[in-house]
Image (spheres, rainbow, N blue to C red):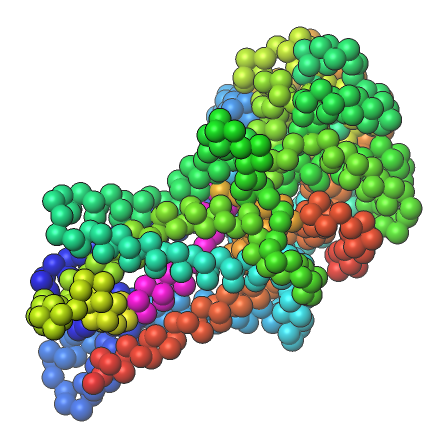
Amino acid sequence: MKKKYFSIAGGAVLALGVVTACGAPSNNAGSNGSASGSASTTSNQVQIFSWWTAGGEANGLNALIKTFNKEYPHEKIVNEAVAGGGGSNAKAVLASRMQAGDPPETFQVHAGQELMAWVNAGKMQPLDSLYKSMGLNKVIPAAIINDLSKNGHVYAVPVDVGRGNVLWYNPAVLKKYHLTPPKTMSQFVSELKTLKAKGVTPLAYGDKDQLGSVMLWENVLLATMGPQNYDKLWQGKLSFNNPQVKQATNTFLELLQYTNSNHSALTWDEADQMVADGSAAFNLMGDWAKAYFQSKGLKEGSQFGWTAFPGTNNDFEYVIDSFGLPKGAKNPTGAMDFLKLVASKQGQDEFNPLKGSIPPRTDANVNLFDTYSKEAMSDFKKDSLVPSLANGEAANPAFETAATQAVTMLISTKNVNEFVSALNTAAEENPLS
Amino acid sequence: MEKTPVLTSQSAAIARSSVAHHKKRRFSWDKMWSFLTLVPSLAAVLIFVYGFLGWTGYVSFTKWNSILPDYQLWGFKNYQILFQDYRFQSDLRNLLFFTVFFILACMVVGLFLAVLVDQKIKGENIFRNIFLFPMALSFIVTGVVWQWLLNPKTGVNLIFEALGASHPPAWYTSTRIVPSFHVGQIQFGLPIAMIAVLIASVWQMSGFAMALYLSGLRAVPEEIKEAAHVDGANGWKTFWRIVFPQLRPVTVTVVIILVQSSMKTFDLVYAMTGPGNGYVTDLPSLDMFTTTFQANQYAQGSAIAIVMFVLMMIFVIPYLWNSLRKEGQ
């Protein structure tokens, strides 16, 4: 009897060990990163840190690496990509490496406040001479360069541009109910009403990862305030007590009446799937959704359509990936060589068609791109360029997290005053600049 | 050794060190050698467990709330901000209800399964393994599977709808809280969405409770049961009056292990629901992850970790105390 008692209990303990072992968050990528970092006694290594590990992003990066190897055969690229959606894991690994004084040669970072967090911490080196020698000031829009600069010095080169204010729709569903892609908010709301009456989910969104809800809110904000005031808000020049913020938030709550009840169960791509299979008509998402639709074998134009989010027709909410040069990189020459390639016309024309994004350089070869991207490239040249909060451009990470929390709270309490005061508190604790 | 030998890694380490202490009375190479072999693991535990614990505690009192370390002391400010926070208040509410119902359900289901398996049936091994099997899965796997099973649009609700239910449950997308009354910034009560998470976690861990209870049942001497039988007690009475009281130590073990596993639950919720609609399924561990690694507020994140640690200690210390005292006797 006793013996059996022990064998069962022992089995249970063993099983518990297995569970905890499986359950412990594995951080392999992180430990690999630091291991290879400390082992880099040779100075010809160029560690490229990113969260591009799959799909078109990874193909784009690999194409860049291939070209780099051809042009700089004496340098050795080490691809240190860390998997994880939106780079949440990668950012944590990067932060620990930077603090340990073991930075990679260059790393992927969103333009705007996400980059500025590193610049303000004094961890980045200016790239003014690179911009001068390559003439980048002439080919990259001033608003973008401004977003990569502090006190007149520029700190990173942009590699791709995504657009955050795109309303995706299912053309077949719109056609069935005789609707056209909406241009204004009032047209949008009346179409949502029609669709709801027909029993179709009018507007799908997914906020399991909280991206869908914050992006929807910031788009309504942009549509309500216009690009100038929207920009001022993120620069701290306009208070959240501005009546337009309340008005936008009320519109946002109105739109939520037309959304899927299971939004908190879905991530953004699962919400796009609802549009793809016709169970929903619209979805607001960045243009990385295009890659998702295409991966499902849908044809652009006939099987999925797009328009700017109603009321933001002349605005381009940008989401930009850039690369910079951290202080203390062991091989700055190699890093500069890579940045040169990233900033070059050739590099951007190679990378972006594969990733499905558009190049920040305005002199890119349009013929390499699909219909959506061609449209986006022409909009990028003429629209007002504004940053995205949900994707790290508009505000510092701490404010972004607090604002995300406020939006989540708003969705459940529907209390606009509480929401505005939460934003004010967040801005007090983490000043916007 | 009537106590189940679980959770002994810490207690054994402490016991070992006290043994090492006694050794000094009379020197012998043999004892010296055994002490030396313990030194590496002791050092590792000191640095990587207690050292980092202390460091986390220290950071939680600093101003380090951005990428750049800032070790200026800030008193209890991080804790003050934390306890005024809507999200953290929701976390504590969720943790309370999650822990209480998780443990109750695991105990009831576990005991029930153990009694069934203990009926000297054929194929006992098979049943035991079936019930224990979910535990061998990673919480991430459980989370993903139950996320789809309890998705209101695609999962078991399709069965309910086929049976004619017009309002099938919203599972983890529900925002209802029962009973709902205002405490601090939040509505206090059991978030209905938590039930979905509870189902998944109980499914995974009740087999563990069963294994412990089964071992407890097997440890009850046959003679006592026979004596009860001779005295005219029926099966039901024998169980509640004779067997059940003997399971007390096992129950304590089950509670302690489940409490500490429920308090640090992260992966299950991360994979299954995320923070949820208005933080109805959020837990301190998720909050800590976002605060530390996405908002880069290291001091704030450390404060959350320390609060979790203190809550855990409230349960674990009395247990360790108790079992150490018994070992000493």
Residue B265 is inside the magenta segment? yes
A401 and A414: which is toward the camera: A414
Q: Residue at x 41, y 63 (%)?
A: B259
Q: Is residue A324 left or right of residue B237?
A: right
A287 vs B292, left or right, is right
Q: Is residue A116 visible?
A: no
Q: Is residue B162 visible?
A: yes
Q: Residue at x 85, y 50 (%)?
A: A240
Place of residue A364 in the rendered image (x, y in percent of width and height, measured from the top left): 71, 17
Compared to A115, does B188 lie above or below?
below
Q: Position of residue A48 (x, y in %)?
A: 53, 36
Q: Percent from the top left, x then y, of residue A93?
A: 52, 48
> Toward the viewer: B106 or A365?
B106
**Residue B114 coordinates in the image, percent (x, y):** 24, 55
Instruction: Return the residue nearer the eye: B16 or A299.
Output: A299
Above or below, B122 relative to A69: below
